[in-house]
Image (cartoon, grey):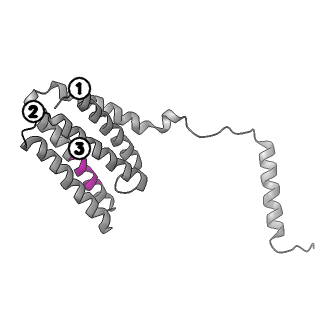
Amino acid sequence: MATTIPGTATTLRATATRATSSACEPAQTSTRRPWLLRRWPTGVGLVLAVSSVAAMTLLPEPARPWVGAWWVLTAAVVYLSWGTARGELAERRWLTAETAGVLAFGAVALAVVAVDLSSPAHVLAAGWLAHALWDVVHHRADKVVPRWYAEACLATDLTVAASLLTIGLA
């Protein structure tokens, strides 16, 4: 019977197994997906934004500010609802932030429809840009909504804001 130092036999056996298996297997290529496949939420967000802008062009002009106001408010309510459903708003600071977000984006929506503005598109664009910053905060914190959703929403918000500023749909 051979004597072994405790822990040595296991370590030697594990090292030999790794060396043997790596020598017998072909070199594996990286399993990292290409950049475009990793950014699929951005693609989803862009498709949603283009669809939203196209739908907005079909509306009569007087209805556009109202619909735009509802969309910006709904974007904030989705975060509050999703965070509640995921149980991520148990922390008081996140619940407070989400509630404040709904109130702030609600104020933007009210400003668009209640005030006689010469160009509601600029107010809506500011609301969408503010929501884009909201998305960045949530993406970095990885709280309230999944990271993929925050990324898709960011792409949507920036595209809609840019179209409001360039085309002026509201």
Which residues fall within the magenta stretch? 74-82
At a point 24% along the width and 41% down the height, the residue shown is 126
Q: Secondary structure at mark 1?
A: loop
- For label 3, the residue is 127
Number of other residues with Cα within 10 Å of mark 1, as a class: few under 14, some 14 to 19, many 20 or more:
few
Q: Secondary structure at mark 3?
A: helix
Q: Nearer the viewer, residue 23 or 166?
A: 166
Circle nearer the N terminus (2, 3): 2
Is residue 42 placed above or below 19 in the rendered structure? above
* Quadrant position of the C terminus in the picture: top left
Q: Which mark is residue 63?
A: 2
Q: CA distance from mark 1 to mark 2?
A: 16 Å
At a point 28% along the width and 46% down the height, the residue shown is 130
Q: Position of residue 108 (x, y in %)?
A: 17, 46
Q: Which mark is residue 167?
A: 1
Number of other residues with Cα within 10 Å of mark 3, as a class: few under 14, some 14 to 19, many 20 or more:
many
Amino acid at dot 1:
Ile
